[in-house]
Amino acid sequence: MNRKGAAHKRQRRVMNPSFSPGHIKEMNELFLMKALELRDALSAHLGANPSETVNIIPFIARCTLDIIGLAGFNTDFNTVKNTNGEKKDENPGNIAKQENAGSTSDLADAFAKSFRTDQGYAIMQILLAWIPPLRSVLFLFDSTTRAAEDAQATMRRIGKQLVEERKRELGFLPPKADEQQSQQRDAPSSGTGKDLLSLMIKANMSPDVSPEQRMTDAEVMHQIPTFMVAGHETTATGLVWALYSLSTHPEVQSRLRTELYTLSSPTPTMNELNELSYFDAVVKECLRLNSPFENTLRIAQADDVIPVGKPFLDRSGQLRDRIRIKKGDGVFLPVLVMNRLEEIWGPDAAEFDPERWFKLPEATNSVPSVWGNQFSFLSGPRSCIGFRFAVMEMKSILYTLIRNFEFKLGVAEEDILKTSAIVTRPMVRGQKDKGTQMPLIVTPWTP
């Protein structure tokens, strides 16, 4: 995420094959398998109390964490199944604590501690990112910071083991003499060679890649938390907001369910899912209206001039038709503004309307985008490399949930607030002490 210039291009070139359309197609069965586990876990949670109000966040978070464990490292964290049979939680808004309930994976636990989603995350993480000297100070006085540092050390240790293990399995390192020692390591064993980490190592060690263009083991290892953030946290957030939109628009939810049931199988192929036109429009509209990232930042690597679409008056009252930036300047990219700009999307830009995707305004062609004429996955050389993965993961989970449950908002619509801490999460007005929440009335549905 933080690499620049030639180093970023080199890493991107090595990682691209792991996110190819063909490989994502192979992942579809995995996505649906975990989606069905989520269906069963949610049904078990409801038990004899159908139409119960449920905070859907931890359920979705567990599912996406399990998916990235398998897809990224061929490791099943089993957080969907292993929930210790809990029905309630004292702090249902804390995904970091809930999503690993019952999990015995050190990697999953370390990830949760490193990327906390309870209160205090936003300000603290931003300060640590922008003011590195604070890290050593907070390490002495703040238990949360110490826990996060310890967790990241665990991630580095297990990440190193994972990389070494995959290289041995793929034949790039000689096997260890002591096989028993290998079995006792923290890092789980693979063998399929189709997880993202294995594919990246194979691409990196390919004869077509010159030695100077290859990523170091440390660089490969550092992709592990990147995979987990991108494949787990952002997708979970996008799904939660998608269920919110469908809960507040029952007519859309009903029409979508009807289309989903035109497929008889609970495990359709990727092509079958992509052929559902209204489903595709719903997913695009959900990500346009409530992108997991509301904005991001880029740092200029050289002096440059940015032309603007419309002249503007600067602070001194002079009319400008371009913006001059200097090397090192920060450039704010307003993702949500681009996705809701009336000049692009029309006067109903702030409304949820999947129908717009069947008659897009011509102005949407001007949006820099790698998917869906929107800015949610950015564009250019630093666009989201895993956008295909994220879209198919979302489709697989929504396909399963909407076919099996009806969702209604459990509080007044105006009581759902947004809080941005890297990604944009929901909270309930007057319940900040409970952290992030999305209370939904969930009712089993059968055709």
Image (tube, rainbow, N blue to C red):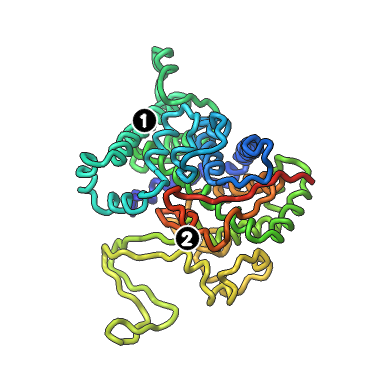
Which residue is nearer to you in this view: 26 or 268? 268
Residue 319 vs 299, above or below: the answer is below
Residue 66 vs 335, above or below: the answer is above
Task: Name which residue lies at 43% across and 24% down.
Answer: 168
Task: Name which residue lies at 40% across and 53% down.
Answer: 421
Disc 2 residue type? Ser
Residue 223: where, in percent of width, then height? 40, 41
Which residue is nearer to you in this view: 330 or 8? 330
Q: Secondary structure at mark 2?
A: loop
* One can see residue 387 in this view: no
Task: Name which residue lies at 75% across and 54% down.
Answer: 259
Q: Are marks 1 and 2 in contact (CB under 8 Å)?
A: no
Residue 167 vs 404, above or below: the answer is above
User: Few, some or many C-alpha atoms within 10 Å of disc 2 (few <14, some 14-19, many ≥20)?
Assistant: some
Which residue is nearer to you in this view: 17 or 111? 111
Disc 1 residue type? Lys
Q: Which residue is mark 1?
A: 160
Count of marks placed on residues: 2
Residue 411: where, in percent of width, then height? 57, 56
* One can see residue 160 in this view: yes
Q: Secondary structure at mark 1?
A: helix
Residue 393, label in figure: none
Task: Name which residue lies at 77% across and 49% down.
Answer: 261
Which residue is nearer to you in this view: 220 or 403? 403
CA gap, disc 1 and disc 2: 31 Å
Residue 409: where, in percent of width, then height? 61, 55
Q: Which residue is mark 2?
A: 379
Residue 11: where, in percent of width, then height? 39, 46
Q: Is residue 447 left or right of residue 109?
A: right
Disc with the residue nearer the chain's start (1 vs 2): 1
Q: Quadrant of residue 84?
A: top right
Q: Is residue 303 left or right of residue 392?
A: left
